[in-house]
Amino acid sequence: MKTIIFLLFTFFAIQNFSYAAFPIVENCNSITVATDLPVSAVDGVATISMILAGIAVFFNLILLTSSGLGWGALFLLVLSGVFYIAAFLLGLIGLWSKNKKWQALIGVFSGLLVLLVLAISAGSTGDPNAKD
């Protein structure tokens, strides 16, 4: 008997606290469900910047795992650099997104990481043991 009362109490309590999981627009006469959610163009740019960063990382993984590519390695390196720069620039534009800012940050940080590596490696050219 206690179990039945507890189950009925739980059923009515859950029924009172449930809510709609979709947006509802209330009018004076009727209630309609809003099906069009606003998506800005900047959200798409943020997504594209994350995808470009992923492609560039994929090219870098190919470079790290394969040997003996010759000119193909240079081609993949230049191609990944182009994708990193594009991801960085599109990520800067995507930072104005309200919904997908994290995707833009992935593009920006991957581009900044490559720029940091280039800045560090630019100062380390030549033989460090050579006397001027």
Image (spheres, rainbow, N blue to C red):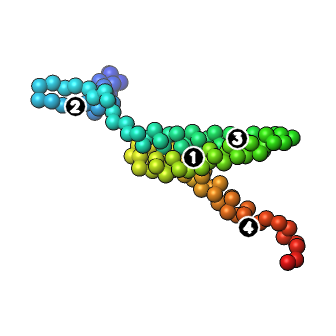
Q: Are marks 3 and 4 in contact (CB under 8 Å)?
A: no
Quarter of the image for residue 26 reads top left
SS at mark 4 in the image: loop
Q: Which mark is residue 23?
A: none
In the rendered image of this protein, does residue 17 appear above or below residue 125? above
Q: Say few, some or many: other residues with alpha carbon within 10 Å of mark 2 (under 14 / 14 to 19 / 20 or more).
A: few
| Of labels 4 and 2, the one closer to you | 4
Q: Which mark is residue 123?
A: 4
Q: Say few, some or many: other residues with alpha carbon within 10 Å of mark 1 (under 14 / 14 to 19 / 20 or more).
A: many
Measured as percent of width and height from the top left, residue 64 is found at: 78, 44
> Which label's residue is closer to the chain start, 1 or 2?
2
Residue type at the position of mark 2: Val
| Of labels 3 and 2, the one closer to you | 3
CA–CA distance in space, label 1 to label 2? 40 Å
User: Which residue is drawn at the image coordinates 53% and 50% (left, top)?
Assistant: 89
Q: Which mark is residue 86?
A: 1
Measured as percent of width and height from the top left, residue 30 is found at: 15, 24
Residue type at the position of mark 3: Phe
Nearest the eye: 59 or 77: 77
In the rendered image of this protein, does residue 46 appear above or below residue 33? below
CA–CA distance in space, label 3 to label 2? 47 Å
CA–CA distance in space, label 3 to label 4? 25 Å
Q: Say which quadrant the N terminus sits in.
A: top left
Residue type at the position of mark 4: Gly
In the rendered image of this protein, does residue 42 appear above or below residue 117? above
SS at mark 3 in the image: helix
